[in-house]
Image (cartoon, grey):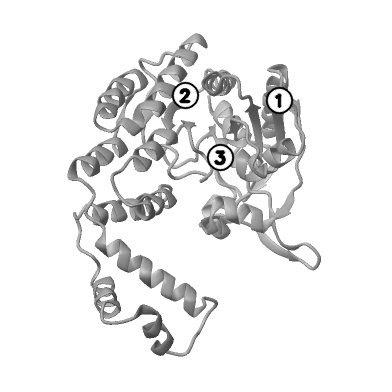
Amino acid sequence: MASKAAIRFEADRLFTMFQAAGAVPVDADILLPAETLLDLYGEDIRARAYVTHDPVRGEMMLRPDFTVPVVQAHMKGGADPARYCYMGKVFRAQDHVADISGARPPEYLQVGFEVFDRSAPQAADAEVFALIAGALSGLPLRAVTGDMGILLAAVQGLSTTPARKAALLRHVWRPQRFLSLLNRFAGRSPVPPARSALLQRLSNGDIAAQVANAAPMIGLRSEGEIAARASALMEDAKAPPLPAGEADLLTALLSLTSSCDAALGQLQLMAQKMPSLDGATHRFAQRLGALRAHGVDTASLPFEASLGRASMEYYDGFVFSFTGAAELPPYASGGRYDALTQVLGGGRSIPAVGGVIRPHLVAALRGAQ
């Protein structure tokens, strides 16, 4: 673990570099409304967040990252285009005592760079990646890229019901649950016995009547909500299986790992069988050209189609990370989050991409060299 002085020195170096790249320094509140963050990140983050109750403002959360408050501030009246940078502490509870004083402390400095620019999104992707790669130059780190937009486009193009697509999209960031749903929708795995028994019972009469006569109401759901959910389960049971070719293609996409240039060729072949991939594949090709313009060797830059599925749920396009030892979190990571700006902008949106660096890891690595 690097000293606090070394960590601060590294953070200041990065912050100065981002300002030199045209970013405007911004600050963000440390205590944020929990409801907004939980809606965006999902309830999964509650286990890692520091949540408290304010008698006036309600449930609040110590800042788990900077992206949401920076987007909120920008959507209230930021310039267009705009570049921001920030430096400050974020707070994440850890699962193991050994992590608290090591590489995963519960509070640590984060330095980041965000770009809001609608003119050339793929060029902005390349700008952010190249800037962070330059900031980490000389360190023994592995850069890897991905694209959540490709996976989301593949799901949206499946020949299945809107409800099944929505279920898969909701669980993209939960790989095991996603795979379980995919296998069930494709007929690769049987319907769970408990669900089969429930469907059998529901088929034996009026659903609303069965709900009304089932038992005393306990919990927050109304009889109408329970009946609607039961009806949705019955409708889902009637849906035909996902075509085997589409399920196989999606499975192959999830496991795609190669260099960026090689991945482009494979994605173009996949798009011939799944036209919904055309737009995302075209944007991927444009991004590779922009990366090469920044001097990035895309022929050797790794690409993993599933990268980003274990990170923040707001990423919906280009994603990247710089990793070192397997037991450590990424030294830097980031990605595109266009949809987040629409959610926080009340319907207004602007393409946005950003990335963060963890100075305590970088300082420790520099000290070990």
Which one is nearer the viewer's eye here, 207 or 266?
207
Closer to the N terminus: mark 3 or mark 2? 2
* Residue tagged 2: 140
Residue at 70% from the left image edge and 43% from the top image edge: 69
Amino acid type, mark 1: Asp
Q: Is residue 23 visible?
A: yes
Which one is nearer the viewer's eye here, 299 or 272?
272
Q: Nearer the viewer, mark 3 or mark 2?
A: 3
> Looking at the picture, how far across and down is residue 51, in whole percent?
66, 61
The disc placed on residue 339 is 3
Say if mark 3 contacts mark 2, CB within 8 Å. no
Say if mark 3 contacts mark 1, CB within 8 Å. no
Secondary structure under tag 2 reads loop
Amino acid type, mark 2: Pro
Above or below for 238 versus 107: below
Above or below for 200 versus 75: below
- Relative placement, left or right, of 300 versus 360 is left
- Relative placement, left or right, of 318 versus 61 is left
Above or below for 286 versus 257: above
Amino acid type, mark 3: Ala
The disc placed on residue 80 is 1
Secondary structure under tag 3 reads helix
Q: Quadrant of the N terminus?
A: top right
Q: Give the alpha-carbon distance from disc 1 to disc 2, as whole Å.
A: 36 Å
Q: Give the alpha-carbon distance from disc 3 to disc 2, as whole Å.
A: 34 Å
